[in-house]
Amino acid sequence: MDLTLIFALQVLVGFVCFLIGLGLGSLIAAIWLRLAAFWLRLGKVNFLTAFNAAFTSNLIVLLFNFSIGFNTRLTMMSLQALEDNGPSRSVLSPFAFSPIYFVYVTAFGLLITAVIFRRIISKDREPEEPMSFSDSFALAALYFALSFAFAITIALLAFCIVVGILSVMK
């Protein structure tokens, strides 16, 4: 097979897997969004509306984070190429970003998510009045907290499974 065709297939498979992952993640996120709206007493949110809001929010925040990371990586590679032949250091380190970067990204993602929730969920609300920004911000914050707690739980579960498998193999 031609290398160009192999590369095109890899890109296509990667894009399809990206969409499947985004869709499955948004299905789970729609449950968290409905739960957060229930806990905050913001009224009933239709599942399809919650899925639409979660999918749109996840896609926009993910694309924003990807573009920032790609731009930063490209800049770091360019700066490293301009250096003299000094000691080579790896810019693939996860510590290439300062901790404040993650604070800014989280805050920006929270604000963008709140705006998206306000626009999408307000259209489908029963009292037909727009959601206030403070309500949408509280909804986005609780949605982030539930999603983070779920991700940590899955990570701990995976860690325990790996430790269990390794202890059995010993």
Image: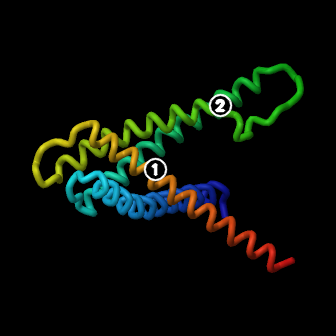
- Which residue type does callout 2 highlight? Ser
Q: Residues within 10 Å of mark 2 (few under 14, many from 20)?
A: few
- Secondary structure of the residue carrying tag 2 is loop
In the figure, 89 relative to 156: above or below? above
Q: Is residue 101 left or right of residue 27?
A: right
Q: Quadrant of residue 97?
A: top right
In the figure, 2 relative to 63: above or below? below
On residue 145, the disc is 1
Q: Which residue: 40% across, 44% down?
A: 141
The image position of residue 160, as x and y in percent, is 68, 69
The image position of residue 50, as x and y in percent, is 30, 57
In the figure, 136 relative to 47: above or below? above
The span from disc 2 to disc 1 (Cα, nearest Å) is 22 Å
Q: Quadrant of residue 134?
A: top left
Q: Which residue: 37% across, 54% down?
A: 55
On residue 98, the disc is 2
